Structure formats: structure tokens, C-alpha cells
Image (spheres, rainbow, N blue to C red):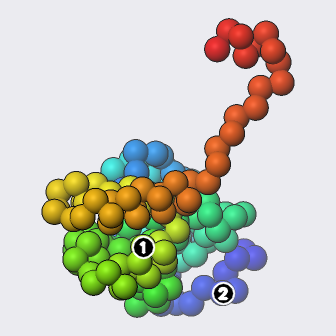
Amino acid sequence: MALMGSITEADRNFVETWENITRSKYAVIKVDSRGELKRHVITGRSKFILTSEDRIITQQYIKHDRNDPFSNGCFRPLLAPDSITVETNPNAISDDEIVAMLQLADDEWVAAVERITSPHTLSRLADFADSVNISILRYRDIEARLKQARGNVRVTQKDRAQYEKL
């Protein structure tokens, strides 16, 4: 198997726990007992376990980092190796860290919000902001950063007749 070169014995044995915080379904690759790669679907809003090896292999198959649910904020680590921290992945913050972030001083607040690149994590931040008493300026900071993280979404339609039906 070509992918096994960068995977250690510790990666094969460490069992991680993650949570899909979105409503979307994602597929991860798991290595079965015979060493074959099997696709496993993770449903929305669910917890799941996999080995570090499974996560590494899944991440190697993802073409663009922005589509990697382990680093873009779609999956939140509950139990992960020490290599996965807020410094290595600012989108992988827990609910407690979000609440603490909402209570930061103004200069720390701006820096913390700017580090987050995931629309999913920013949406979680906005959800918690609704339940915590924060200033309207901070809420606007979250909304502006969320708009920036989502980017411009433009759908073009080449078939005019089809466009008219919609």
C-alpha cells in the first residue's frame, strides 16, 4: 500500500473521537482488518471514532485543504493527538473555548476572530453569541468575518430557458 510510508505504529493504534458539527454528510476512509480501504459515511451532527491512520489516509485523498473537514471546522476533535491544537488548527475549537473567546478583551478578540477561517466555526461562534450577552459590535465582527470566510457565491446559468423556469 503506497500510503503507509508516513504512518507510524502509534497512528495505527491511537483511536480518535470527532464530532461532525454540521448537518452535512461526509465520507472518511477506514482501514479494515485485512488492510483494505473502506468508505464510511459520517452523518450530520454525530460523533464518530477512527484511528489516526484512518484520519491521515482520508486527509491524503482530499485535494484542497479548504475541503478537509478535519481542519476546516466541520469536524470538531473530542479526543485527538497532541499534534491537533488550536495553534495548528484554529478552527478546531471546543464549545468551552468559544465561550471563553467571547469574553476576551477587545484587542485579543479581534486577533482571535481573524484566526478563524471556517464558516462552520464562525457559525458556531454566532450561535454561542446569541446565548451570551455580547456587544453588537462583536456580533457585527462575527457577521463580517463569516461573510468574508464564505466568499462570493455566484451561480451562473447558461441556458436562458432553464433560468426562466427557476
Residue 18 at what x, y percent from top left? 37, 67
Q: Which residue is mark 2?
A: 6
> Is residue 134 toward the left or the right of residue 66 in the image?
left
Residue 25 at what x, y percent from top left? 47, 46
Residue 8 at what x, y percent from top left? 56, 90
> Is residue 103 toward the left or the right of residue 17 in the image?
left
Q: What is the quadrant of residue 131 in the picture?
A: bottom left
Disc 1, SS: helix
In the rendered view, tell whether residue 7 sits above or below residue 43: below
In the rendered view, tell whether residue 94 sits above or below residue 45: below
Residue 19 seen by the camera: no
Real-space CA distance between mark 2 and mark 1, rounded to the nearest whole angstrom = 33 Å
Q: Which amino acid type is marked by label 1?
A: Val
Specify the quadrant that holds the N terminus.
bottom right
* Residue drawn at 76 percent across, 32 percent down: 156
Q: Which amino acid type is marked by label 2?
A: Ser
Q: Which mark is residue 113?
A: 1
* Residue drawn at 21 percent across, 65 percent down: 134
Disc 2, SS: helix
> Is residue 139 toward the left or the right of residue 5 in the image?
left
User: Callout 2 environment at 10 Å: few (<14), some (14 to 19), or many (20+)?
Assistant: few
Residue 166 at what x, y percent from top left? 64, 14
User: Callout 1 environment at 10 Å: few (<14), some (14 to 19), or many (20+)?
Assistant: some
* Residue drawn at 32 percent across, 81 percent down: 106
Sequence-wise first label, 2 or 1: 2
Kindly report which numbered mark, 2 or 1, lies closer to the viewer in this rendering: 1
* Residue drawn at 33 percent across, 50 percent down: 45
Residues tagged 2 and 1 counted as in contact (Cβ below 8 A): no
